[in-house]
Amino acid sequence: MSNLTLAKRYAISLFDLATEKNEVQAVENDLRELKIVWNGIKDVKTLFTSPKLSINKKKELIRQIFANANPIVINTLLVLIDKNRLADVSDIISEFMILSNEAQGVAEAKVYTTRPLTEEERTNISSVFAKNVGKQSLNIQNIVDPSIIGGIRIQIGNRIYDSTLITKLDRLKRNLIG
């Protein structure tokens, strides 16, 4: 069985439990923070996936580090330690986010601009482009990229809406050169 299939199973179980306890948003918030720590600090991932550290020590560290996290998240991490699946944390979180977004009618979007978006711009982009993909709103990750010169590029799933100046110039160049 592939790691992604297992990650989906864990994510479904986690989502079902969070839904049953009416704590989906709290669990989602904690999982977002966990993903930042897990993927952002290489030593954390290395430490918890190391076979040199005992299972009991890993559990003790999880309880200490994530003491303020939702108990559902902590218990999930403890189960993953028992099943030797802690390396799959990122995939499980990603799958959970997909389930949560689907339930809430939200889509993840990467928005590339030359400068940070204002809150009003985020709201406008969300309301316009969410309708294009059949969602109620977008969860926007703003990526500042000065190389696009001007305009905006939006990636929602596998759809890309590109009205950047660099793309328009490239298109013009291709048309002129033939």
Image: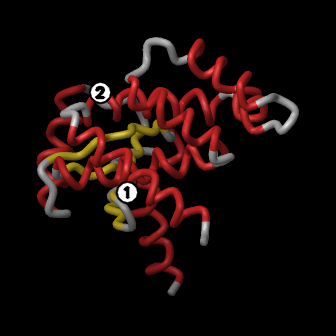
Q: Are marks 2 and 1 in contact (CB under 8 Å)?
A: no
Q: Quadrant of residue 168?
A: bottom left
Residue 26 circle label:
2
Image height check: is 107 above or below 53?
below
**Relative to 112, 81 lies left or right:** right
Closest to the observer: 94 or 155? 94
Q: Quadrant of residue 129?
A: bottom left
Q: Earlier in the sequence, mark 2 or mark 1?
A: 2
In depth, the one of 125 and 67 nearer the eye is: 67
At label 2, the amino acid type is Ala
Q: Residue at x 22, y 26 (%)?
A: 119
| 44 to the left or right of 10 | right
Front position in the image: 114 or 98: 98
Q: Kindly identify the residue that appears in the image at 56 percent across and 33 percent down.
A: 78
> Looking at the figure, which quarter contains the N terminus?
bottom right
Q: Which mark is residue 155?
A: 1
